[in-house]
Image (cartoon, rainbow, N blue to C red):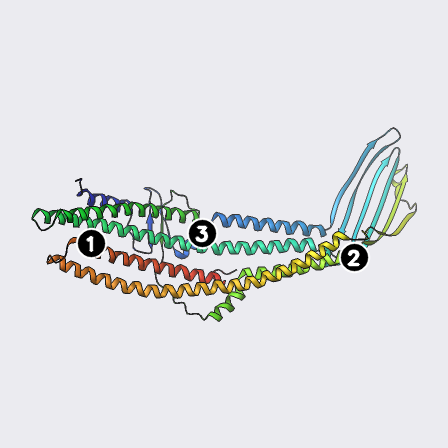
Amino acid sequence: MGRPYLTPLFLTVAILLVEPCTPGHAAFFAKPGRRILKLNLPQAIQYALTHNRGLRRAANQLKRRGFSVDSTSSEFDVKLRPLSQAGVSDETRRISAGVKLSKQFANGVEASLTPEIGRIDDAFRQELSASLKIPLFKGYGRETNLDPVKRARFGFRTAQRSLYLARVNTVIETVAAIYNLTKSRRLTELFEFMAGRLSHHLQDALLRRQVGLATPLDVFRVKIRLKDVQDNLAVSQTALKNAADRLKLLLAVPMEQSLTVTAPLTLPTVDMPLEKAFAIGLARRVEIQQAQDALAESRRRSQVAGHNLLPGVNIVAGFVSAGSAAVFNDIFQPQGDRWTISLEGSTDWARTAEKAAFQQSLLDVGSARLDLASRREAVKREIRQELDALHRARTRIRIRQAQIKQARGKLALAKIKFHYNMADNFDVMEADREWQQAKVNLLNVKTDYIVGTFRLRRVLGTLLER
């Protein structure tokens, strides 16, 4: 028949190993000699926002985008490049050094100045050259020349919004993990309590059987029920451990770290008209802002593509002042300057690729406009769904509260009938199970409602400030 009386001892050891806590509080797997990390709900959220590994990777991507902006913007900085040359041939020996100072302006004008000095065979030589390139059609204008910079800035803004969305999702995942841990802990406590209660029922059934007040069926019924509860307890303890590990991953806490998290179970009131919620969501959702920015960017790129249809014609002006002499100081004496000006161009007459790119840009504008409209409707749908879910949760909470009162009354009646031998132990055990399960059901609905309020703030765009 086994040793059922060992069950209370087993439960006592289990309770000592896993620190009991009230609903909304979780303390798990403390390691002796290790400091416990204690957090409440706001602290846990802030801890996740600071230490979450996914957010740190997203922040690195944002930094990379920032470097891309710096790289493309540097094309318009003043550049100073050193020049040097040395060579020997059958006819001559040459060595020279100089610098090239150049600047590309945002309107497309390019200017350069190159002083150079050197020696050819036995003569010294200096040269000062300057050039100015002015595009007349294609390539002239800030919008065209700043296109790489504006593309990089758009990528940076996109990365900023992606990081914000990652932070929002991390908050939601952290809150859900904390309340999932709370539910798992409460369910474990329920099975621990039920196992202890069934052990008491088993002892009582054995005593009643000895005096003829219970049948062997009553004893077997309790034993079977006790084994079911013990199996459920083992499963719930595993689920509790998995929930704790999930939270530690989100917080970037080592698995061996002891952690205690508290979360309130008070129900916030949500009473917001649907139209007001729509207005808030459409104004604050970062996804809509991203779609609007993408539409503006596609229009800008279409303008650049249209500009590229123009012919490429440039005016190039140059100036060269050179001198050579056997004595170094004489090379700076005026020996004649040379001015040049020319009109140059190189453009494909058909411009097939440019025309195709322009047509594609028009399609991109249309697609971006459709994406913005779709995003607006998607936001409205998400807001309506979250509000409906909260209303349903409120109704379910009232139902579960009424169910607890009914289950408590049923348990009291079953105990009275059992005391007067008007019912067997099965009625008491079943009523007790229903009462405990009703409390767990209420906790589940409450936590779903609380997490739902965070989800509503997410779809409204008010969960985190940017």
Number of other residues with Cα within 10 Å of mark 1, as a class: few under 14, some 14 to 19, many 20 or more: many
State the image coordinates of residue 97 (x, y, percent, origin top left). Answer: 80, 39
The residue wearing badge 3 is 48
Helix, strand or loop at label 1? It is: helix
Q: Disc 2 versus disc 3: distance between alpha carbons?
A: 53 Å
Q: Residue at x 38, y 42 (%)?
A: 256
Q: Give, as a three-letter code, the residue at label 1.
A: Met
Where 10 falls versus 368 (above or below)?
above
The residue wearing badge 1 is 429
Residue 213 visible in the snapshot: yes
Q: In this view of the protein, which residue sits in the foreground, 75 or 297? A: 297
The residue wearing badge 2 is 310
State the image coordinates of residue 9 (x, y, percent, origin top left). Answer: 20, 43
The N terminus, quarter of image: top left
Q: Give, as a three-letter code, the residue at label 3.
A: Ala
* Nearest to N terminus: mark 1 or mark 3: 3
Number of other residues with Cα within 10 Å of mark 3, as a class: few under 14, some 14 to 19, many 20 or more: many
Helix, strand or loop at label 2? It is: loop
Number of other residues with Cα within 10 Å of mark 2, as a class: few under 14, some 14 to 19, many 20 or more: some
Please give left or right for residue 82 compared with residue 383 in the image: right
* Nearest to N terminus: mark 2 or mark 3: 3
Residue that protrudes farthest toward the right in the picture: 336
